Image (cartoon, helix red, strand yellow):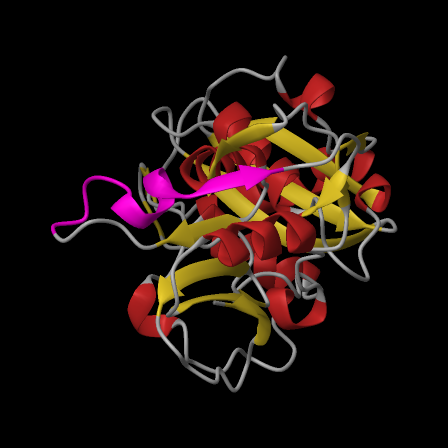
């Protein structure tokens, strides 16, 4: 601090002060289960949030007003469902609305402070990487490698006794909490006609994704294949041995 007659210089460490206050707020805030009932009452507002697994901070994120706290946490609530090695009831969240964002990178500062946010930079919460990444090896300690999808979980969906393969794959795409991708017509706008032409008969009762996909593949002409990758299920006209995936069925 420099002093002259009638003059003084004062430097305020805004990033450090903001971080300190936020950490105090977070640490005093009890976590809430990451379930839709808790998330849907949150404001769609900008802020920062934490995900905790067994009380340990595993992920830190920030939002803006367009994709706010409610939207982001709802997406995360879906991401932790139907995963092997992960009990979603053990995942909680803490969220803080921040009314005025400065140039301070709160997300990075909080990640550095807590040091245990192992889901950050692990692929957690990422969008579908697309067809070009289906053969790519995942990070060995990444989220999807540690908690791959569970395609043997039973789904309680009321299916008509007879329906088309198109109806099944469209329903699964909407219902599943992970990516379910299938081949479209050339141009990528409408479902492939083989799905529309194929009829599938389903017995009453719950069925797993594996069972439903197997039934779809058996209804299709020769040349189709369904594969389970750690983060998604894909159905394409192909015959590919995916090094990092498991074959579900092929026609």
Give the answer, above or below, for where 37 lies relative to 242: above
Give coordinates of residue 192: x percent, y percent: 27, 47
Q: Residue at x 49, y 52 (%)?
A: 219
Q: Residue at x 45, y 27 (%)?
A: 68
Q: Return the residue nearer the eye: 198 or 228.
A: 198
Q: Residue at x 48, y 47 (%)?
A: 106
Residue span colored magenta: 187-201
Specify the quadrant of the image occupied by residue 204.
top right
Residue 13 at least partly seen: no
Give coordinates of residue 117: x percent, y percent: 66, 61
Q: Return the residue nearer the eye: 44 or 101.
A: 44
Residue 54 at least partly seen: yes
Left or right, residue 129 beside residue 218: left
Residue 190 forms part of the magenta stretch: yes
Specify the quadrant of the image occupied by residue 85.
bottom right
Left or right, residue 127 beside residue 124: left
């Amino acid at each position: 601090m420099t002093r002259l007659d009638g003059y003084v210089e004062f430097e305020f460490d805004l990033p450090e002060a903001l971080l300190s206050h936020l950490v105090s707020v977070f640490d005093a805030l009890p976590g809430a289960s990451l379930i839709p009932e808790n998330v849907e009452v949150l404001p769609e507002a900008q802020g920062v949030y934490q995900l905790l697994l067994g009380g340990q901070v595993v992920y830190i994120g920030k939002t803006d007003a367009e994709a706010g706290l409610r939207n982001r946490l709802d997406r995360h609530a879906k991401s932790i469902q139907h995963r092997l090695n992960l009990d979603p009831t053990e995942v909680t969240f803490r969220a803080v609305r921040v009314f005025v964002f400065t140039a301070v990178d709160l997300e990075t500062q909080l990640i550095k402070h807590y040091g245990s946010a192992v889901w950050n930079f692990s692929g957690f919460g990422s969008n579908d990487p697309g067809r070009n990444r289906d053969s790519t090896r995942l990070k060995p300690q990444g989220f999807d490698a540690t908690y791959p999808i569970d395609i043997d979980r039973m789904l309680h969906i009321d299916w008509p006794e007879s329906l088309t393969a198109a109806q099944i794959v469209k329903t699964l795409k909407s219902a599943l909490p992970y990516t379910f991708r299938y081949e479209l017509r050339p141009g990528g706008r409408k479902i492939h006609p083989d799905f529309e032409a194929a009829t599938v008969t389903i017995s009453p009762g719950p069925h797993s994704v594996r069972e439903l996909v197997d039934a779809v593949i058996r209804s299709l002409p020769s040349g189709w294949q369904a594969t389970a990758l750690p983060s998604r299920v894909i159905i394409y006209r192909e015959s590919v041995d995916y090094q990092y995936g498991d074959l579900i069925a092929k026609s």
